[in-house]
Amino acid sequence: MNTRPDQPLRLGTRRSKLAMSQSGHVADAVRAVTGRPVELVEITTYGDVSREHLAQIGGTGVFVTALRDALMRGEVDFAVHSLKDLPTAQPDDLVIAAMPQRQDARDALVARDGLTFEQLPDGARIGTGSPRRTAQLNHLALSLGKRIETVPIRGNVDTRIGFVRDGELDAVVLAAAGLNRIGRGDEATELMPVDGMLPAPGQGALAVECLASDAELIAALGELDDPYTRAAVTAERSLLARLEAGCSAPVGAFADLLADGQTVNEMRLRGVVGTLDGSTLVQLSTTGPVPQSYDEAMALGRELADEMLAKGAAGLMGERA
């Protein structure tokens, strides 16, 4: 890290409104803890310019590689990612220096006429680019005795909600955290309970990444780290890695903290894998002490993934990513 106090720290970010908003929040926090100016450096990623569906282009890493390349070339000092976009394998030359406190991890339904999922008519058209959401939405519909059509979509929040406003779709499903970060959380007609709709591993959380060799910057960014968020997300991503699945696979995972009064004493990890038509799900959970180390969080995720594989999870994911 350049130690001149008047030299701005350069934060690499995607150009989307959502990415700029969440990077802006991180920039404010870094200014507060370092006393240094922070400037945003906008970077276009392959996922931003490709019009293919995420499942077709692999999902994993398509929003990340260009940011990491800029870090490695020294064009930026640190970068902010949506954690659910990060591949589970971490490059040796880079480190996630901070995982700030997680936003709402749930999925949000934005439907016409203020409808909830249960109120949507039989045959409703719901937009999502996520196989995970597709599998669980279809499963929910089957449990309610109705049929839905999931329609693959891409685009920013405005584009996706526009499909509903224009009458092309009855509803779309987005991350609640994304809506909240751009001040549009009130447009959700329902926040999907995690009991029926497990989020993507890491959903709602951010990763602040920098060079592994920059000890000074790692220490400064570490002031933003939330240990509970890091433990939860590490367990979720460990499960994803053990299943050998990328973020384009129909896998959901969520770790939450269980408190006895004011004392947090346990972590519950839930995972789901399903067929896209929703006809078959493998959904399991495990509960244990709150992980006190990276290795303990990783072990929690691996153990649950092994149980899911023993129940047939591998056969539900199609091609292994």
Image (spheres, helix red, strand yellow):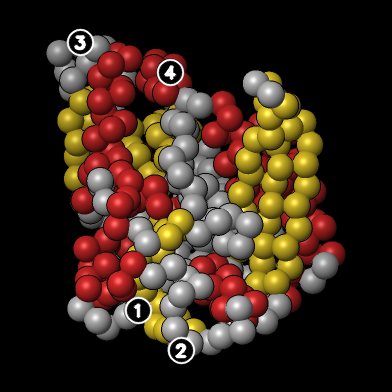
Point out which mark residue 123 bears: 2
Element carrying mark 4: helix
Label 3 sits on residue = 5
Asked if residue 138 shows in the view, the reply is yes
- How crowded pointer 2 is (Cα within 10 Å; few <14, some 14-19, many 20+) is rated as few
Mark 1 belongs to which amino acid? Asp
Numbered disc in front, either 3 or 1: 1
The percent coordinates of residue 30 (x first, y second) are 30, 22
Mark 2 belongs to which amino acid? Gly
Numbered disc in front, either 4 or 3: 4
In this rendered view, identify the residue nearer to me: 9 or 203: 203
Q: CA distance from mark 2 to mark 4?
A: 49 Å
Snapshot quadrant of residue 245: bottom right
Q: CA distance from mark 1 to mark 4?
A: 43 Å
Point out which mark residue 254 bears: none
Quarter holding the C terminus is: bottom right
Picture layout, residue 30 above or below residue 11 = above
Between discs 4 and 3, the one toward the N terminus = 3
The residue located at (44%, 78%) in the rendering is 120
- How crowded pointer 3 is (Cα within 10 Å; few <14, some 14-19, many 20+) is rated as few
